[in-house]
Image: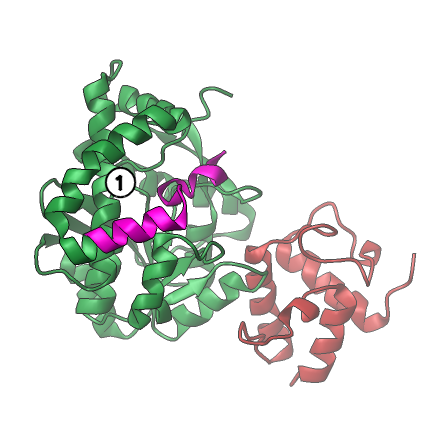
Amino acid sequence: MEALSPFELEVARLLVETLHLEDVQPEDIGPERPLFGEGLGLDSIDALELALAISKTYGFQLRSEDKDNRRIFASLRALSQHITQQRTR
Amino acid sequence: MSQDWARLPERGNPLVLRLILWIALRIGRPVGRALLYPITLYFLATAPAARHGSWLFLGRVLGREPGWRELFRHIHCFAATILDRVYFLTGRLRPFDIEIFGDRWVVEQAASGQGCVLLGSHLGSFEVLRAIGVTLRHFPIKILMNTGHNRDITGFLNALNPDLAQAILPIGGPDTLLRVQENVAQGYMVGVLGDRVTVGERTVRVRFFGRETAFPAGPLLLAALADCPVILFFGLYRGGHRYEIHFERLAERIALDRRRRQEQLAVWVQRYADRLEHYARLAPYNWFNFYDYWEEDA
């Protein structure tokens, strides 16, 4: 499996911790694997919790109006890239 | 199964719906109401699954096997609210006698400028709330709705009534609840229905009419995450031109401890189920979940 970059691993840890994914190890999340539906199987509630946690940790809001949300939420890699671009802390 | 019945009212082709609309709006409610009798008979004869759902529910409420007359009354009540939906959604409220109970909960909430979750159900008419709350009173209300099937009456009428169309939050995509949370944070009261489980949705087991069944966990989990109050609403059809809207506050806020989240949430969902049961006993023919609600046949 493809290794995670250090930042992807950090986001993966946030994800596992926030959503209490008990059977998932952060380093085992495939960076290109879908987060929602098939793949990690997250749902709309997870997305909300994740968005709230990201805003607390990285100091910016994920907005529902963002037309790129499907892409941003598509995988750990996409999400990590978005955070890298938007973070204020 | 529940998925299929989510669209029960919109069964039939768009032409028939247009015809009903035309009769309702151009000819009038008395003629429309006269037509409810053959329509009800038609449903009773051609929708065995809905009939069975009605039979199961009424059996549970009445404590005995319901008769044909009661099944007819149940479907007729449903059809009557579908007809009236046409008037509500086009803002024609004058012929109706609508009594509101617990008004202060929404009035105070609106005055506070803070958002909340307005939690309803498929008991009675959801549209009477939309008509009063959005069109008449101009409360800051948004309704979380599935807009995927635009050919139905609601989609059609939404197009006629831009006020109502603007007040819809469409369901779909992982950011649906994020959108709801943002609207709550902006001070909107967001209406959601909490009694019908969709495929793949998170659920909580509660007791309802003395028997355990699954209720959606989402609406109250959402309220907990958005850290906002929850106000219940029930729009009951009471026959003739009479409706009642009941508001109650379920929670000022829902605090969940991460470790005990599921059990704490179950307590809140049980409270909702208890109030739903209360109103369902008050107006049993308003129960519009025409399927095997307790999964008794499974």
Q: Nearer the viewer, residue B87 or B123?
A: B87
Q: Amino acid at mark 1?
A: Arg
- Give the colour chain A carries in the figure: red
At 26% across and 28% down in the image, what residue appears? Answer: B41
Q: Nearer the viewer, residue A30 or B35?
A: B35
Please report the residue visible at 67 percent of the width from the left and 66 percent of the height from the top: A73
Q: Is residue B279 visible?
A: no
Where is residue B58? Give x, y as percent: 27, 24
Hue of chain B? green
Magenta stretch: includes residue B15: yes
Q: Is residue A16 left or right of residue A43?
A: right
Q: Which residue is mark 1?
A: B275
Camera-side residue of A79 and B126: B126
Q: Which residues are magenta?
A: B1-23
In the image, is residue B52 part of the stretch drawn in magenta?
A: no
The chain carrying label 1 is B
